[in-house]
Image: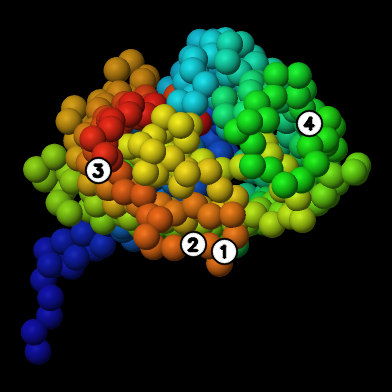
Amino acid sequence: MNHPSLISLFLFYSISFASQIVDVKIVGNKHSHDEIILREIHHPIPGEYDSTFARDDRNRIYNLGLFSTVDIRQIDSLYIITLIETFRFFPIPIADYNEAKGWSYGGGIAFLNFNGLNQKLILGGIGGKETTYFLNFKDPWVTGNHVSLLGNVYQFNTKNPVYSYHYKERGINIGTGFYKKKVHKFNFLLGLEAASIDTAGFDYSSLNYPHKIFSDYNYIRGEIGYVFDRRDIYLDPTSGERLSFYFKPKISMGESENYYRFQFGYSKYYQLSEKYFNPVFSVNSKLYLQYSKALPIFEYLYLGGEDFVRGYSPLPEKNDIEVSHLIEGFNIIYQSFQLQHTLIEKKDYSGVELGIDVVYFSDFGISANDIASFKLQNTLIGFGFGFRFFASGAGVIGIDFGFNPFSQQFLHLSDSN
């Protein structure tokens, strides 16, 4: 009878032991507590090393937005997580550009990792074409399965660029949420909102509004949201999908009517190649539906601009006369196709990850005052190219050059925050 040699047995047990993970070691988290990293780890420990689990763990930790670099690998029997923390808190010079209004400037302070527990505290204000003061707090994981807590107070005022009335809004909100089976996310919010309209400079000549305009609007507002999210990297997805549904009711506490908004969104990402500039093709769909017996004029939607069909202005009169009447509406259907690839690969520069991508896009959209009025012949088509500037902690800044079939072109600025 043949028996395995002692050398064979030694090699077998050595290889088996070498592939086993028996403990976790975290390196580089000077401010972030171990617990907010460990709770993102799904790799079985103890257990045999699995590169797929390690990749998914890496992505979840990176998605916290606290680290410019996350690396996970096996060394001996340890699961080594190496981190480079991005800036913990910083002053925010704010320059906000609204295509319909212009520039607003201000500043604030953001604590991205407040208390070392991934809590975010942001306060500040801006002035100019829009004036805003705000204080926001969010703890994304208070207890249980991603049970979150958030709250904010704010004041906002601006001049409407279409009808020239002055609008002021104040509010306070508190919210929570939780996960189910990692990819199902539920969100809830309750708040008070007080809005007022000063019609001293109102442009009634261009107004097509069949209802009474009140000077004050007071609401109890709510929000119920569901998100199904399988994206690999939130900041810059290369694969996966995200589906969202939000119901946003506002219950009037005055003479104005109640109104309700339904928002549906779906995005899908396909990585075409891991080489040759890492191209990613994405599909993005949006559906906004609003209902009220008398929808407030400040809730009108505008199909052109950074949020919907790029290549058009959100100001109806700045578009070609053939389509200017198709910009404003209560409801919107939107579809976009986009190809994105690396221009300058993201790298870590002393705790800040920077990089630049190029995008090419084609957008389609329809607006209407009621669902029955959606017509394919009213579809707006826009196309163009742009750039995405990545900075860990600060998000993504987008610059798009949009064009339409009427030989018009528009510059669109956006940010992920």
Provide the secondary structure element on which disc 1 rests: helix
On screen, residue 80 above or below 53: above
User: How far apart are the alpha carbons under marks 3 and 2?
Assistant: 21 Å
Judge left or right: residue 292 versus residue 16. Answer: right
Instruction: Say which of 8 and 90 sits in front.
Output: 90
Is residue 21 among the parts visible in the rendering?
no
Q: Do the CB atoms of the residues marked 1 and 4 lie less than 8 Å apart?
A: no
Name the residue type under label 2. Answer: Phe
From the top left corner, tell me how far across and down residue 293 is, in percent.
Answer: 77, 56
Q: Do the CB atoms of the residues marked 2 and 1 lie less than 8 Å apart?
A: yes
| Residue under label 3 | 405
Q: Which residue is drawn at 77% across and 22% down?
A: 198
Q: Residue at x 16, y 61 (%)?
A: 11
| Residue under label 4 | 195
| Residue under label 1 | 371
Q: Which of disc 3 and disc 1 is earlier in sequence? A: 1
The mark lying in front, picked from 4 and 2, is 2
Judge left or right: residue 108 versus residue 25. Answer: right
From the top left corner, tell me how far across and down residue 76 is, in percent.
Answer: 29, 45
Q: Do the CB atoms of the residues marked 1 and 3 lie less than 8 Å apart?
A: no
Q: Which residue is drawn at 46% across and 47% down?
A: 326
Instruction: Say which of 8 and 154 sits in front.
Output: 154
Q: Which of disc 4 and disc 3 is earlier in sequence? A: 4
| Residue under label 2 | 374
Residue lying farthest to the bottom in this orientation: 1
Name the residue type under label 4. Answer: Ala
Instruction: Say which of 86 and 235 sits in front.
Output: 235
Name the residue type under label 3. Answer: Pro
Provide the secondary structure element on which disc 3 rests: loop
From the top left corner, tell me how far across and down residue 347 is, in percent.
Answer: 25, 26
Q: Which of disc 2 and disc 4 is earlier in sequence? A: 4
